[in-house]
Amino acid sequence: MATDKKTRMTQQRRVILEEIRRYNNHPAADEIYERVRKRLPRISLGTVYRNLEVLCELGEIQCLVLSGAMKRYDGVAKKHYHIRCVGCGRVDDAPIAPLNELEDDLYGTTVFEIIGHNLEFTGLCPECSRQRAQHKAAG
Amino acid sequence: MATDKKTRMTQQRRVILEEIRRYNNHPAADEIYERVRKRLPRISLGTVYRNLEVLCELGEIQCLVLSGAMKRYDGVAKKHYHIRCVGCGRVDDAPIAPLNELEDDLYGTTVFEIIGHNLEFTGLCPECSRQRAQHKAAG
DNA sequence: GTCTCTGCAAAGCATTTGCAACTGC
DNA sequence: GCAGTTGCAAATGCTTTGCAGAGAC
């Protein structure tokens, strides 16, 4: 049952982690792949995916499953919320503290055993906001 | 820009909507397809997907993109939260009122123009909770 | 030396799309 | 009758996986 496998810090794994933390712009797998490829040209996309999973299990990064998009990865493993641009998909950290009391409101009112919660804000980043304003003005 | 298309209430579209609302258990596309197929054996999966999108645009249903799962559909278009079982994927409504004030906390602290938010609880449904308890006791 | 990890390529899976025939309105 | 819609099938896009060789410890 328990995974007794010893994980090795391979060059690929190390570079992937470094690139995720470099800007911490919540990149998706393909962006991580492209960035890592500049340093390790022979790396494969499969290796990137496998390492992302391992790094999540190790608690080094966290995997974000936000609405309407592919998985994204966060170099900061600590729980926090995000805001996603509906125009371009850009993801920022949401400057708001975790609301653990939200779960308390559910005790006794649901048959579920509560584990946690995810909160995601949606919005428009400055670039997309400006673009839409121009578009509206032009139309 | 505006979609002037007139939507027709075809038999397929009507049956799909009826089946979504029949139990309102937040079914995914494949479950809707299987249910509708019992009444319209010649319907195709593509038609189901196309109609789900149209019904969302019409505001008849809402599309739920919850973490780690395929899209699900809710026959109640009104905004509300959900709780998802991490064991089996079952989705229930969360008995908690919408927290619109959450968005107020972000004004002035983010460069994003805020549009909305999604809140999803995770947990274990009674069946999966029982199963894990048994498993733990046995192991 | 062993056991994990890698690169490659193929497969998997949910969803989308092109197209000719069909059907609400 | 016309434009929206359907069924079919192929394509798409992200992610996973099988396998033989390579490399970390």
Image (cartoon, coloured by chain):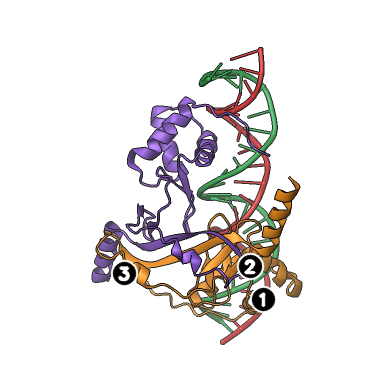
Chain colours: A purple, B orange, C red, D green
What residue is shown at x 33% (from left), y 66% (from top)? Answer: B114
Tell me the element at label 3. Answer: helix
- Give the label on residue B104, or none: 3
* Same-chain status of marks 3 and 2: yes
- CB under 8 Å between discs 3 and 1: no
The residue carrying mark 1 is B23
User: On the picture, is D20 further left or further right than A19?
Assistant: right
User: On the picture, is B138 further left or further right than A17?
Assistant: right
Q: CA distance from mark 3 to mark 1?
A: 35 Å
The amino acid sitting under disc 3 is Asp
Extreme residue toward the front, this view: B137
Residue B65 visible within the image: no
**C2 in relation to B99, above or below:** above
Give residue D12's position: percent from left, percent from top.
Answer: 53, 50
The amino acid sitting under disc 1 is Tyr
Q: Quadrant of residue B30?
A: bottom right
**In the rendered structure, the residue with mark 2 lies on which chain?**
B
- CB under 8 Å between discs 2 and 1: yes
Q: CA distance from mark 3 to mark 2?
A: 32 Å
The tag earlier along the polypeptide, 3 or 2, is 2
- CB under 8 Å between discs 3 and 2: no
Give residue A136's position: percent from left, percent from top.
Answer: 27, 70
What residue is shown at x 39% (from left), y 75% (from top)? Answer: B2
- Give the label on residue B27, or none: 2
* Same-chain status of marks 3 and 1: yes
Tell me the element at label 2. Answer: loop
Q: Residues within 10 Å of mark 1 (few under 14, many from 20)?
A: few
